[in-house]
Image (cartoon, rainbow, N blue to C red):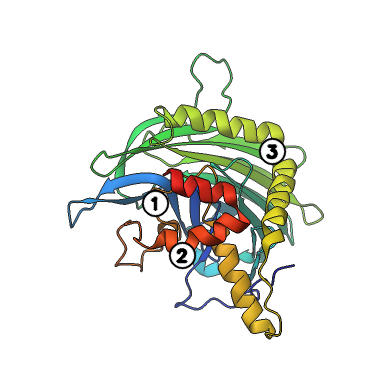
Amino acid sequence: MPISPPPVRRWRPEYIPAYLSNGVIGLRAGPIPLIEGVAIVNGLAAVDPVEKGERFARGPYPIGGDLEIDGARLSRLPGQSELVEQAYDFASGELTSRFRFRSGETTATVEVLTFCSRSLPTVVLQEVQVRVDRPCRLVITAKVDPTGISGAWRARETTTPDADKPVVDGSMLWETHGGLSTCGVAYITSFDGGDGVERRREEHDELAPLSTSYAVQARPERRYVLRLYTSLVPSQAHHEPHRQATRLVGMAAQRGFDQLRDENRGAWAEIWKGRIKLIGADQRWQALADAAYYYLHASAHSSSLFSTSMFGLAYWPNYHYYRGHVMWDIEAFTFPTLLLTAPESAYALLET
């Protein structure tokens, strides 16, 4: 088994959020992923507002959300939250974030599981589990959020054309700055919270993030679980990306969270068969080799367009010197390894 990094139990300002990817979608998930993160979609391009040339573009954040206890919202009161632990499992590509959120005398303990699917590589999945220590009104929200990124809405839908009942919670078509490309997004949620659950979607505000909320009179003796499936498709991959995202996220929901998680773990188990073992080296060097191996393969996929550099998928705003360029020597560094350990990804790299 690979050596995963030690869990983070105290967040420091100089830390960069955890990077998750499957080679098609790249995420940076903050210590509380519901309210902080960045998404990059391979193939999205925009006009740089300063240099006026083509550059990579951020996509809507697909795993956003919120938590509310008796009217107090996590997004408005982040100072009332406390990180318990964030752990990255390199063996499965899963990130688990645990935190507490307090409102008055009530404390919610939250566990968030996030991963990028390798069997459906346009899909990101997230499970939010919440427990409370006393009765309260609890609202858990899933959100797809373009706030803070440059671009414009081109379509926002909470209904499905030619269907009496929506097949997804919502979909959107987002155009990047300068109109060089668009990103289609669709999402589906499910909730396990017993009886008396109130479900609400933001259906009327044309500029609001897509969101679905579940409200319940929570009790300490039970667990409340929200599952989120989100698909992001660039226009470089399909001429109607929001329609294709709707189809793909529908397929994901039909397979189900547990099956997709098993498929993802199976894909990573296959990748790790090529693990490089450093004979005679101490654990520190093996951990570094495992990290390099993991991040390389997390950033490559047979379905990848490879039009956004692997480095670009791991973008975070303090990478001020990066504009989306593909490194001239990427084949020299990545192709030989992928040829031996993931030949289908190596082939895709050459094809593009």
Quarter of the view holding residue 230: top right
First in sequence: mark 2 vs mark 1:
1
Give residue 121's position: percent from left, percent from top. Answer: 56, 43
Residue 22 vs residue 174: left or right? right
The residue carrying pointer 1 sits among few (fewer than 14), some (14 to 19) or many (20 or more) residues within 10 Å by Cα, namely many
Q: What element carries label 3?
A: loop
* Above or below, comparing residue 121 to residue 110 in the picture: above
What residue is drawn where x is 45% and y is 58%?
A: 310
* Above or below, comparing residue 296 to residue 65 in the picture: below
What residue is drawn where x is 71% and y is 85%?
A: 280
First in sequence: mark 2 vs mark 3:
3
- Residue position for label 1: 308
Q: Distance between the residues labelled 3 and 1?
A: 42 Å
Front one among 16 and 162: 16
Give residue 303's position: percent from left, percent from top. Answer: 52, 42
- The total number of labels drawn is 3
Amino acid bearing label 1: Thr
Amino acid bearing label 2: Phe
What residue is drawn where x is 28% and y is 46%?
A: 46
Q: In which quarter of the image is the C terminus?
A: top left
Q: Is residue 104 visible?
A: no
Badge nearest the viewer, 2 or 3:
2
The residue carrying pointer 2 sits among few (fewer than 14), some (14 to 19) or many (20 or more) residues within 10 Å by Cα, namely few
Badge nearest the viewer, 3 or 1:
1
- Residue position for label 3: 197
- Residue position for label 2: 333
Give residue 108's position: percent from left, percent from top. Answer: 67, 61
Front one among 77 and 6: 6
